[in-house]
Amino acid sequence: MKTRVIVSLLAVLAAVPASAVEILNASYDVSRELFDAVNPAFVAEWKAKTGETLVIRQSHAGSSKTARSVADGLPADVVTLNQATDVELLEKSGLVAADWRKRLPNNASPYYSLPVFLVRQGNPKQIEDWSDLVKPNVQVVFPNPKTSGNGRYTYLAAYAYALDRYKGDEAKATEFVGKLLANVPVFDTGGRGSTTTFVERQIGDVLVTFESEVNAIRREYGKSQLEAVVPSLSLRADFPVAVVDKVVDKKGTREVATAYLQFLFSPAGQEIVARHYNRVHDASIAQKYRAQFPEVKLVTVEEVFGGWAAVNAKHLAEGGILDKALLNAHAR
């Protein structure tokens, strides 16, 4: 087995021209298929523009785990994550410049999504909204909010729904998410792990994940076997991107790394992004793919929680509301 791995690695290395430029994109867990489509399109564009052969490597994990890996030394040229605070971690580490949001449009977020539900054929538990996820006979699958931006958005979306339902009563909202967390049979560290748990291991009645992942799963496994359910209210999830300044300056890859991220905002990039079920900012492309994105009441972290700094201090910090909700969940 070891011999085969070494031979395969040598074959891959031999296939890369010595003159090729390489960059590494460190990304969140469920973006693999998206960047499998983005990368060759950009490589071809870069080749036509500069004549250079470009190789784009990928690294995937939960968004927060990825950010920590880069902070700990993973030499990523760019990060494409699903939460601004993960990029801020790299900013605080001195790897990303403080003006990263201003370098690209839409606060450096080329697209966005939202947590929605995936249920099994026929929706046997009749799951229609967040309130159905706290029923005692429903098993809910989503990744750990402590390690995954995907899971964090799910937790916050459920909390936002509860605040709306209970007219701002935080005690009732905390109780609500405690019931939800108690219904999670297993916490995976990232979104793709939760997909495997639900689809392949057949655990749970409903998977909560990004809309883009739900549609990708249905496309791969068959729409007749799995059904998408869009709740009455959900939380907008912006996907921030940034050049890792310290790495590109060391490697001399700033120009290509910057162009790679700019491609995500271009019409060609937005087309690919929308085709993979992410909601885009380009008006004409958003209109073209309008039919695949149901109407939903979308709220933001800023509107409901006062921004990510407030979320970190009140919900995600040690001993915060999330920890209290988890304790309540374990006590049930």
Image (spheres, rainbow, N blue to C red):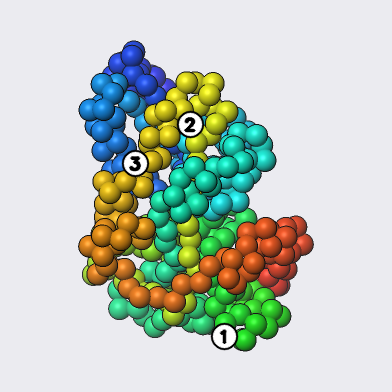
Extreme residue toward the top, this view: 18
Q: Residue at x 48, y 65 (%)?
A: 236
Q: Residues within 10 Å of mark 3 (few under 14, many from 20)?
A: some
Instruction: Name the side, left or right, on which 226 lies relative to 103.
Output: left
Quadrant into which the C terminus falls: bottom right
Residue 88 visible here: yes
Tell me the CA gap for discs 2 and 1. Answer: 43 Å
- Under mark 1, the amino acid is Arg
Q: Quadrant of residue 221?
A: bottom left
Helix, strand or loop status at disc 3: helix
Q: Residue at x 39, y 29 (%)?
A: 256
Helix, strand or loop status at disc 1: helix
Q: Earlier in the sequence, mark 2 or mark 3?
A: 2
Tell me the CA gap for discs 2 and 3. Answer: 15 Å
Q: Are marks 3 and 1 in contact (CB under 8 Å)?
A: no
Q: Residue at x 59, y 66 (%)?
A: 302
Q: Position of residue 307 (x, y in %)?
A: 62, 62
Give the number of the disc on residue 129: none
Q: Residues within 10 Å of mark 1 (few under 14, many from 20)?
A: few
Up the image or down, 143 lies above or below 60; here it is below
Give the number of the disc on residue 77: 2
Instruction: Name the side, left or right, on which 22 lies relative to 130.
Output: left
Give the number of the disc on residue 165: 1
Q: Which residue corresponds to mark 3?
A: 263
Helix, strand or loop status at disc 2: loop
